Image (cartoon, rainbow, N blue to C red):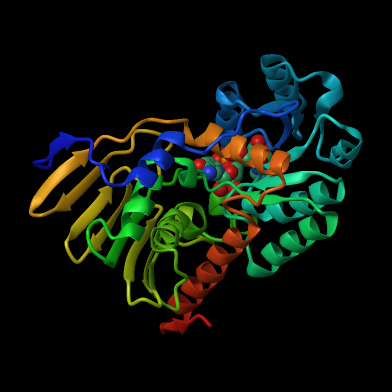
């Protein structure tokens, strides 16, 4: 437990406070709410479905699953009629459902590209979970498919709608603790055996694809820069049955154009969720940083460490859902479009390559 005063700072960071309080800047709803179809009714989808109750501009209108029992259970729970429940084989019929504006893909990673392309071809906008796909090539195909269909594509980077993270971005980019020099970001959890995440064919990779991506994405949103150099080391106990096809731990160093360095950890065998932005005059720390709830934030400046109280604002999940609804209503671009998912995937491929080849990789 650190020695920290509790106080709400943010005076002098007016824009940051406004962002933090808003959580996802919502205009008043115009016309009807945007209708979402959820594809894949697993654990995260279950959480997302519960969040429509907090939305102002979004509603759940359709479900897609391979399990009839789940379609019936969640259909009844959320008032989705049988006519709006689809199997994977049936999925393309969604084009004929005018209530569906957005298809939200919450499937194992290797299925994201296929369902995004099919949704775009059905004339729907697409929200796709992170990681966007399992390769740069797939990300490009998804972006092209949505562009060709004239539909929007957004990636489920919910932390961009979480008030502590929004404030940290604002403070870091405005130099509240001086110009940023170093970022450390650690994300991991102890992976349970026997799940698709541990099967490379479905996940595309191990901890980096699933949880380390939060470390990577944070370094990019905290700096507003793209890394130009990557070095990585992987440590995986291949005798552990969980890690036959995917990596456990991968540590990576990123160098940014302004000279900022980020040291990051991604792990499937240790539990952590934090980042710290160190500037010339102090640091900003979030711990937990990117969890579903419970974020805490500390700032050290002028020799004092203080816990920052951040106004709760709208929850990150509802903020994310309503933001995309608003983009569609207003014809604006999402804060985290497909290009954001592609940018992460480019770095992920370089991290894997660096670990494999034992050398630094330069990103053009
Ligand atoms: P999950 O295992 O709980 O759910 C996956 C769903 O896909 C299940 O309903 C399963 O039946 C279905 N499915 C269809 N075909 C499948 C197949 N061949 N193999 C396995 N499952 C199949 O997983 P989850 O935790 O809900 O993750 C789903 C996606 O959501 C992943 O891309 C994950 O990275 C992402 N996710 C994002 C967050 C976040 O905070 N943004 C959190 C958790 C998961």
Q: Residue at x 20, y 48 (%)?
A: 299
Q: Quadrant of ligand 1?
A: top right
Tell me the quarter of the picture where residue 41 sits.
Answer: top right
- Residue 81: x and y, percent? 81, 18
Up-down relation of residue 113 to residue 305 (above or below): below
Q: Nearer the viewer, residue 217 or 31?
A: 31
Up-down relation of residue 229 to residue 296 (above or below): below
Up-down relation of residue 149 to residue 54 (above or below): below
Q: Residue at x 43, y 46 (%)?
A: 191
- Residue 110: x and y, percent? 67, 55
Q: Nearer the viewer, residue 250 or 125?
A: 125
Q: Residue at x 36, y 59 (%)?
A: 173
The answer to whether residue 195 of the structure is visible from this angle is no
Q: Please give left or right for residue 290 compared with residue 150 in the image.
A: left
Q: Residue at x 78, y 59 (%)?
A: 147
- Residue 28: x and y, percent? 62, 28
**Image quadrant containing the N terminus:** top left
The answer to whether residue 170 of the structure is visible from this angle is yes
Q: How many marks?
A: 0
- Residue 264: x and y, percent? 35, 63
């Amino acid at each position: 437990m650190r020695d920290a005063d509790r106080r709400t700072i943010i005076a002098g960071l007016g824009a940051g406070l406004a962002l933090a309080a808003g959580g996802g800047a919502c205009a008043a709803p115009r016309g009807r709410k945007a209708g979402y179809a959820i594809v894949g009714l697993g654990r995260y989808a279950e959480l997302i479905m519960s969040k429509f109750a907090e939305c102002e501009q979004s509603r759940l209108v359709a479900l897609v699953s391979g399990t009839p029992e789940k379609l019936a259970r969640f259909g009844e729970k959320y008032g989705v009629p049988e006519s709006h429940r689809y199997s994977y084989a049936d999925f393309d019929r969604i084009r004929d459902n005018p209530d569906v504006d957005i298809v939200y893909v919450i499937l194992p990673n290797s299925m994201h590209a296929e369902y995004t392309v099919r949704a775009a071809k059905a004339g729907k906008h697409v929200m796709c979970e992170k990681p966007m796909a399992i390769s740069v090539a797939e990300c490009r195909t998804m972006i092209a498919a949505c562009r060709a269909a004239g539909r929007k594509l957004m990636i489920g980077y919910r932390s961009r709608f979480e008030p502590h993270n929004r404030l940290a971005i604002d403070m870091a980019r405005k130099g509240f603790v001086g110009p940023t020099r170093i970022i450390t970001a650690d994300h991991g959890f102890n992976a349970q055996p026997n799940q698709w995440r541990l099967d490379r064919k479905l996940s595309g990779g191990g901890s980096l694809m699933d949880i380390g991506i939060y470390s990577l994405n944070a370094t990019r949103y905290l700096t507003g820069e793209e890394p130009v150099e990557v070095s990585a080391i992987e440590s995986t106990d291949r005798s552990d049955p969980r890690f036959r096809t995917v990596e456990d731990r991968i540590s990576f160093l990123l160098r940014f154009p302004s000279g900022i360095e980020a040291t990051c950890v991604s792990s499937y065998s240790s539990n952590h969720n934090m980042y710290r932005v160190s500037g010339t005059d102090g640091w900003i720390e979030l711990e937990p940083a990117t969890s579903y709830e419970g974020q805490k934030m500390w700032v050290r400046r002028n020799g004092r460490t203080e816990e920052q109280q951040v106004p709760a604002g709208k929850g990150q999940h509802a903020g994310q859902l309503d933001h995309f609804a608003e983009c569609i209503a207003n014809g604006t671009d999402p804060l985290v479009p497909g290009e954001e998912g592609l940018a992460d995937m480019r770095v992920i491929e370089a991290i894997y390559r660096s670990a494999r080849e034992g050398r630094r990789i330069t990103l053009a």
